[in-house]
Image: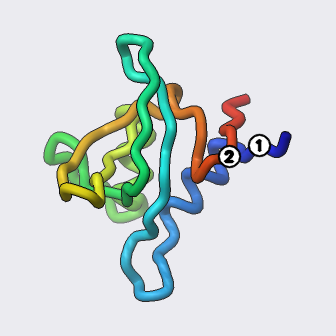
Amino acid sequence: MQRIHIRTVLAEIELPGPTGQPVTFSLDYYKTDGTKGRKAAVRKGGLAGGAVPGPATGGFRYNVQATGTLQLVNCQNEQPFALKIDLLTHYNGTPILHG
């Protein structure tokens, strides 16, 4: 079975779509209570906790490094949420390799 590395996932999420807007993708993950979750349509979100990135770093990478979470927006209801990177299992249906 083919897998996608987490670094590739994080890079693809960062790329803009054809119209310049963030790309939409699906994620499967484990919640912190151990249950499985799935978001069918999400996109990259904003900064966590009002953090301001330095001039040499993008806001997205800043959040990943500082908190270990992805800041996302659910495209179905426009609600922001965060997911821990270590708990992601599938990106667009493809298993994620974390090693």
Residue occupying the point 67% across, 31% down: 98
Q: Is residue 22 visible?
A: yes
How are the residues colored? rainbow
> Is 15 positioned to the left or the right of 72 in the image?
right
Q: Helix, strand or loop at disc 1? A: loop
Where residue 1 appears, as percent x and y from the top left, is 85, 40
| Mark positioned earlier in the residue sequence (2 or 1) | 1
Q: Mark 1, residues whose alpha carbon is within 10 Å: few (<14), some, or many (≥20)?
A: few
At x 43%, y 51%, the residue is 40
Q: Position of residue 10 (x, y in %)?
A: 55, 52
- Judging by the rendered image, the residue that carries numbered circle 1 is 3
- Amino acid residing under circle 2: Thr
Q: Are marks 2 and 1 in contact (CB under 8 Å)?
A: yes
Q: Residue at x 48, y 52 (%)?
A: 26
Picture residue at 36% right of the left edge, 33% below the top? 67
Rendered view: 71 above or below 30: below
Residue 70 picture location, percent across and down: 39, 43
